[in-house]
Image (spheres, rainbow, N blue to C red):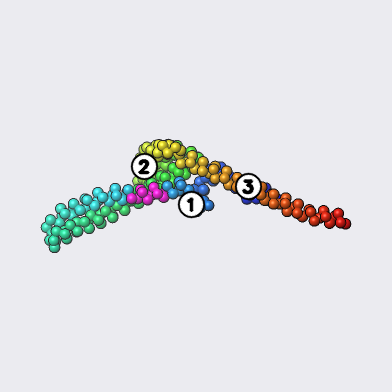
Amino acid sequence: GAPPQFGRPAPPPQTGWERLSELWRRDERQRYPEETVNIAKSAFTGGVVGWVYGGLPAFYQARRAFIEGSQGELFQNRADAVQSAHRAGLRSFIRYGWRWSWRVAAFVTIFNTVSTGLSVYRNKTTIGNFASAGAFTGALFRMHLGLQGLAGGFVFGTAFGIPAGGLLMMMQKLAGETLQEKRNRERRELYEQKLAEWQSRLSVTNVLGEMEGNTQEGPETEGARES
């Protein structure tokens, strides 16, 4: 028969570092964990929101400033004047929208990465995880302003992380289980399924081994009798 350790599935990760390393590995279907996908989605959403937040006011302000500052200029027609105003607004939309976009995307990405990492490492989702992630992210973004900026970013990040985390936890509770609880359940179910399949294959292999052994013993017994 096959040795007992043949093909035995690995148990779910038990330590915090094992769970963290699993965040960046693909599964059998070449898919990343849901937590990692959510980080990427939130980064994209944050970038779009930041672009709109910074770009739209800049667009209208630049357009208005162009109209007010070009009263004495001559245009070929009304359409030419409107297009020139829109081009001025569009340049400001791209310029200031990009400035806000990458900042918001970076803030959201760092915040979600730290909070997700803490939740995965500790194997539980708490307000403290989000508060710590907000404090770290805020301090990181303001540290170039010195000690005062570092302290201000720390306070701002904490104030942002607590309500943001509370909202996320409430949404997860409404869904029936937190993301961490869902992940643990899926890990356990997958392990139990793999273990059952392994035990089934192992029992079949043992039966085939016994049948092969009986087949080999038959001719040897007959030869011994003839001799």
Question: For the residue marked with disc 2, what is the amino acid?
Answer: Gly
Q: What residue range appears in magenta?
A: 39-48
- What residue lies at 71% left-to-right and 52% top-to-bottom? 209
Left or right: 80, with 127 as reference point: left
Taking the magenta stretch, the answer to whether it contains residue 43 is yes
Q: Quadrant of residue 196?
A: top right
Question: For the residue marked with disc 3, what is the amino acid?
Answer: Ser
- What residue lies at 63% left-to-right and 47% top-to-bottom? 200
Report the magenta stretch's main SS. Answer: helix
What's the distance in space between the residues labelled 3 and 1, CA to CA? 27 Å
Residue 124 appears in the rendering: yes
Q: Earlier in the sequence, mark 3 or mark 1?
A: 1
**In the rendered view, would you say 16 is above or below 62?**
above
Q: Which mark is residue 153?
A: 2
Q: Position of residue 184 (x, y in %)?
A: 51, 41
Which quadrant of the rendered structure holds the C terminus? bottom right
How many numbered marks does the figure carry?
3
Q: Earlier in the sequence, mark 1 or mark 2?
A: 1
Between disc 3 and disc 1, the foreground one is 3
202 or 108, nearer to the observer:
202
- What residue lies at 37% left-to-right and 50% top-to-bottom? 44
Q: Quadrant of residue 13?
A: top right
Left or right: 144, with 31 as reference point: left
- Which residue in the protein does label 3 denote? 200
Q: Position of residue 124 (x, y in %)?
A: 48, 38
Left or right: 201, with 123 as reference point: right
Q: Which mark is residue 120?
A: none
Q: Which mark is residue 31?
A: 1
Q: Earlier in the sequence, mark 3 or mark 2?
A: 2
Taking the magenta stretch, the answer to whether it contains residue 115 is no
Question: For the residue marked with disc 1, what is the amino acid?
Answer: Arg
Q: Position of residue 12 (x, y in %)?
A: 56, 44
